[in-house]
Image (cartoon, rainbow, N blue to C red):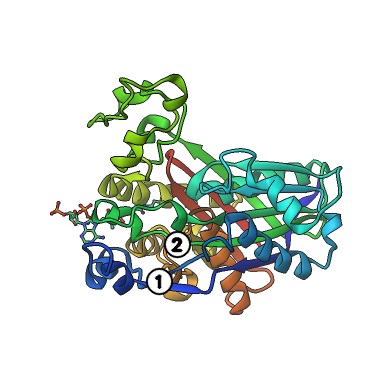
């Protein structure tokens, strides 16, 4: 059986830099508050009307494809992880195929909706396809254009200050090289707390899940026709078309699940925490990453953090951070690289790669 190797990796972040001071001009927040709680100093926002989740993904994918030394036409499967798709449907996978000009009609495209763990989930899916010999050049991307769907009033400040835009991509191929490539992946989920970090509207729920929410929101359904239950004026006026997050609850779950899944994935690969050369955690919050670093006993040069300049880019954060680490020479041939992510769902996942 083959193993899966990373043949090429790339990332793209938009040019526009938005600092905490910029956000403080439109909502009641401060640079000090955001840096102290999250470590974030600035983030990037895509260019309105000019960039989308798909277009940013295409820029990252072009780099990954070039570094893999293949032609776009060689891509036989696309996996696209995002929570901020261009359209409600179809998903970004086919839009990326079109954007890249991949006319190979044999290629398949799959969209993954696993929020912050979406890229690591996607890597595991790709790994299964490659191990069995089904595909030879899988393009895996994680991309987000959060800035288009955030609440820039003070009401949304706890969420809005955290997120940024960007994209990361990998080309994955089979290898028979001894010991190289993806050694193990672990995937987990627990839907009990689905609403603790969620973007509920627009949606077809019709208030069905209200029993799972401590404070039941008023979606304004009383006079609504069926068609208006997906999205209506009331939701828009009351800001119920934005993400919702119970920050402290999410924080507590994250600091528990990150170490758990890292140790589990290492064990599955026959390794221990002492074997980690580089940990690439999903960039949720610098305080979470620092906690995980201490728990794993890692030096500063064994963990990659870039949330300070890019914020939390959800599905894009792991590949952007990994690509930066590789470009900086911090990940070398033969290194044990551990990827770990946790996010909305809740879903969490780990992967161990011998580079
Ligand atoms: N600027 C200033 N004040 C803010 C603020 C902001 N951007 N956001 C929230 N506040 C206020 C709150 O309104 C609250 O005020 P109050 O005490 O007067 O009610 C106070 O700060 C504390 O709010 P709280 O939500 O308890 O803050 P916190 O210390 O938990 O920090 C997060 C908030 C979001 C930074 C933190 O909970 C966190 O990072 N959680 C994990 C989030 C995460 O990782 N999400 C992604 C998962 S993949």
Is label 1's Cβ within 8 Å of ligand 1? Answer: no
Question: Can you say whether 143 is above or below 30 in the image?
Answer: above
Disc 1, SS: strand
Image region (quadrant) for ligand 1:
bottom left
Q: Which residue is label 1 attached to?
A: 18
Q: Nearer the viewer, residue 326 or 101?
A: 101
Q: Nearer the viewer, residue 224 or 40?
A: 224
Left or right of 86? Residue 258 is: left
Q: Nearer the viewer, residue 117 or 223?
A: 223
Is label 2's Cβ within 8 Å of ligand 1? Answer: no
For the point 42% across and 67% down, the residue is 307
Left or right of 182? Residue 277 is: left
Question: Can you say whether 160 is above or below 236 in the image?
Answer: below
Disc 2, SS: loop
**Mark carried by residue 164:** 2
Q: Is residue 21 visible?
A: yes
User: Dot 2: few (<14), some (14–19), or many (≥20) neighbours within 10 Å?
Assistant: many
Residue 42 image offset from top left, x and y in percent = 39, 72
Residue 199 image offset from top left, x and y in percent = 41, 41
The quadrant holding residue 7 is bottom right
Q: Nearer the viewer, residue 184 or 79?
A: 79
Question: Can you say whether 138 is above or below 60 in the image?
Answer: above
The quadrant holding residue 160 is bottom left
User: Dot 1: few (<14), some (14–19), or many (≥20) neighbours within 10 Å?
Assistant: some
Left or right of 58? Residue 258 is: left
**Mark carried by residue 42:** none
Residue 170 image offset from top left, x and y in percent = 68, 60
Instruction: Point out the image quarter for the C terminus.
Output: bottom right
Residues under numbered marks 2 and 1 in contact, where contact means CB atoms less than 8 Å apart:
yes
Q: Of label 2 and label 1, which has the lower sequence position?
A: 1
Q: Nearer the viewer, mark 2 or mark 1?
A: 1
What separation in Å lies between label 2 and label 1 (alpha carbons)? 9 Å
């Amino acid at each position: 059986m083959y193993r899966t190797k990373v043949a090429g990796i790339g990332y793209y972040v938009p040019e526009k830099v938005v600092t905490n001071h910029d956000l403080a001009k439109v909502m009641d927040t401060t640079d000090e508050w955001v840096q102290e709680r999250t470590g974030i100093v600035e983030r990037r926002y895509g260019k309105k009307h000019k960039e989308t989740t798909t277009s940013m993904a295409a820029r990252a994918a072009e780099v990954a494809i070039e570094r893999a030394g293949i032609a776009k036409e060689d891509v036989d499967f696309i996996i696209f992880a995002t929570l901020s798709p261009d359209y409600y449907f179809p998903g970004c996978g086919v839009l990326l195929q079109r954007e890249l000009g991949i006319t190979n009609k044999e290629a398949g495209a799959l969209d993954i909706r696993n929020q912050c763990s979406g890229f690591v989930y996607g890597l595991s899916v790709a790994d299964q396809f490659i191990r069995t010999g089904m595909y030879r050049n899988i393009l895996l991307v994680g991309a987000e254009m959060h800035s288009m769907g955030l609440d820039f009033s003070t009401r949304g400040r706890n969420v809005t200050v955290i997120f940024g835009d960007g994209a990361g991509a990998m080309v994955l191929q089979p290898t028979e090289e001894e010991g190289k490539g993806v050694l193990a992946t672990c995937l987990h989920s627990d839907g009990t707390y689905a609403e603790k970090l969620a973007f509920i509207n627009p949606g077809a729920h019709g208030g069905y899940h209200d029993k799972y929410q401590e404070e039941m929101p008023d979606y304004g359904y009383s006079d609504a026709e069926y068609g208006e239950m997906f999205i209506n004026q009331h939701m828009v006026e009351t800001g119920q078309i934005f993400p919702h997050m119970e920050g402290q609850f999410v924080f507590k779950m994250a600091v528990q699940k990150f170490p758990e899944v890292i140790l589990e994935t290492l064990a599955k690969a026959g390794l221990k925490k002492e074997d980690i050369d580089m940990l690439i955690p999903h960039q949720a919050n610098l305080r979470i990453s620092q906690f995980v670093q201490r728990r794993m006993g890692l030096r500063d040069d064994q963990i990659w953090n870039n949330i300070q300049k890019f914020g939390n880019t959800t599905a894009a954060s792991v590949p952007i951070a990994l690509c930066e680490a590789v470009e900086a020479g911090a990940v070398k041939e033969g290194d044990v690289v551990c990827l770990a992510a946790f996010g909305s769902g809740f879903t969490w996942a780990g992967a161990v790669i011998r580079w």
